[in-house]
Image (cartoon, rainbow, N blue to C red):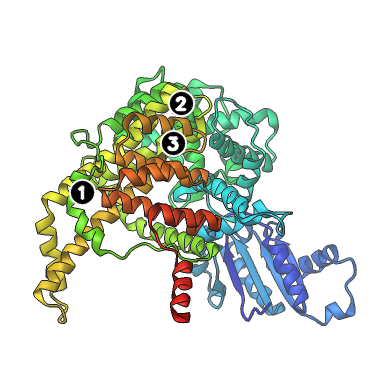
Amino acid sequence: MDISSSLVIPNRERHPSQKKMFAELFNAGYFPTVIDAEKVKQADIAPLVRKTQKQQFSEITPELKYRKRALIIDDFSKIKLNKKYIESFIKNCKESNSICIFICLDSYQYIAPEIEEFDDFDFYEIIPFGNIKRTELIEKWVSMGQEETIEDKSLYKKTDNIKSKIDSMVRKKIIPPKPLYLLTLLQMLESYTPQKLELTSHGHCYQHLVYKALENSKIPNQEIDKYLNVLTELGWYVFDQKKTELNEQDLNTFFDEYRKKYLAVDSQDIIENLIRCSILEKREYGTSFKYLYIYYFFAAKRMADTFRNDNHVKDSISDLLHNLHKEDSANIIIFITHHTKDDWIIDELQLCLMGLFESQEPAHLEAEKLTFMSEFIDDIPDLVIERRKIRDERLKHEQLKDEADNKSKEIDKQIEQSESTDILARINKTFKGIEIAGQIINNRHASLTKHNLYQLINEGITTGLRFLGYFLTIADSSKTEVIKIIEHHLKEHPNLTNKEVQKAAESTFLFLTYGTILGVIKKVSTSIGSAEAQEIYKEIDRDFDTSSINLINQAIDLHFHKSLNFSEIERLNKKFTNNPTCARILKEIIVQHTYMFPVEYKDKQRISSMLNIPMNTQRNMDRKKQIKQ
């Protein structure tokens, strides 16, 4: 371990990293000491260091004394010294140690620049896990104890199943996707035994995190209910007042109102304890919920508990659905569905979905409506089943998801500021609504009636296809104008003739159109799909039997069951004989499946023969035969 300068490492929560640092420093030849900042009472660090070293080492040998000194100050945000003596304290640490590491809350990064003694320090932050790291962690979890025996097929299927659940809980960093939280969620998902039947499996996970935080702060069990009640009312108050931070006057107003309804509580003691256990935190302008999931959990709990008897709460839920394009609105609705099984919420969500692109017919993707795509499909390169390493393909897939997440931040800002009637907002509401419907299906598939499942799934699929119908109508009517815009940009390329520019512009337009069709099919299938509700998807497929629903059902089957239904693939291939666009999409989702999931060689050969997709291994063999001849 090579550390050439002092460090300040911001971190959101207490963690065992100081132990790892201690071990690495010791193994690198240093004499390390770990000190809890709360124990620091004076700027002179020497007495506390000597006392702590005797506790941390059974014997301080001469060899240890001659080593370079390293000091780790844990939880530096909680040091009790004032600014003047903090400067002296840091100076003393630097003078008596070769290496100083200060671990603190990430919010301390705003205070540190004001401390001159930190000017020559490097600042590091523990970054949340993206899709790649989350997948790696889950794979290690799934294969633990059977690393050398688990089959890839089983490993990837279990990993994908767990990751879809984890992703839905940490979406938009509602829960910080850091190792501590991810490992806690993995443990809970594995040993899921809901204590409260009214909560969904995800709701139980969120509740468990809150309970653990309260327990860690040593709040007596008999007082837990009081704290939960305060948090529930506080969540609603923050939502109703439309404030992210509450100043002292806001908190006084809240507790005055609270005492009118419930038995009086010691407000100062409660707030201090909730800050100590990292449920609330002090910020620049006041007090707020530390993590989004805590705010959503309690605001939604209050709404779920009272909407039947409180018209104001009921109206607030309707407003949330109206503003579903906004992240807070969508997330609170999701959390409400974790807290209640009341059909009213599902009915309201369905009504919301019905109102999106309501004047547009769903896209059936029938051949006669896609004739304009035929020439483009003929011109693009044929698909080939190539030999690819599944792990590499899965890594690329996760990289693309990380890139998409980063790019979506700017788009999300625009959507947050847009009106609910704006086209961007309507599109976002469409897919957020479908995602929420999918979460309800995945969380409550066992308790919803088949009739309710059918209605919810059907409305989710139909809403996505209405948007696709809208897009295809707009694309068709504005085709000439869009191609002209693309031509204008292409004309800047000096090596293209006018004819080549026009051809390239048309191809670009059709490529974007094809990409949108494929993208909507995939998005609807992953959002509304569920491994447990297979019979409902098949029933909808039989009832409508449109090309678009056929493709969505096929994509759901591949994504959630990881299995190739050859009889269904053959049926669809025959059905799409005169529909080159749908035939291409069918081939594409199946070929992608072979790259992302283990498929036996004989099954690849069967796909190759059935769909007339060459295999590159076969091509290589044919070339070798020709050379020999």
Residue occupying the point 63% across, 75% down: 91
Residue ID for mark 2: 304
Number of numbered callouts drawn: 3
| Residue at 41% over, 24% down | 452
The quadrant in which residue 321 appears is: top left
Q: Earlier in the sequence, mark 1 or mark 2?
A: 2
Where in the figure is residue 298, as x and y percent of width and height? 50, 34
Q: What residue does disc 3 label? A: 334
Residue 365 versus residue 391 in the image, above or below: above
Q: Give the residue type at disc 3.
A: Ile
Q: CA distance from mark 1 to mark 2?
A: 45 Å
In this view, the mark in front (3 or 2): 3
Q: Badges 3 and 2: C-beta atoms under 8 Å apart?
A: no
The residue lying toward the viewer, choosing from 275 and 143, is 143
Residue 370, disc: 1
Mark 1 vs mark 3: in front:
1
User: Which quadrant of the figure has residue 206?
Assistant: top right
Q: Residues within 10 Å of mark 3 (few under 14, many from 20)?
A: many
What's the amino acid at mark 1?
Answer: Leu
* Distance (Cα) linking label 1 and label 3: 36 Å
How many angstroms separate mark 3 from mark 2 (CA)? 11 Å
User: Compared with residue 4, is residue 392 higher up or lower down, i.e. above or below?
Assistant: above
- Percent across and percent down for residue 53 are 81, 67
Tag in front: 1 or 2: 1
Decide which of tag 3 and tag 2 comes sooner along the chain.
Answer: 2
* Upstream in sequence: badge 1 or badge 3: 3
Alpha-carbon neighbours of circle 2 within 10 Å: few (<14), some, or many (≥20)?
A: many
Tell me: 535 left or right of 318.
right
Element at label 2: helix
How busy is the neighbourhood of tag 1: few (under 14 within 10 Å), some, or many (20 plus)?
Answer: some
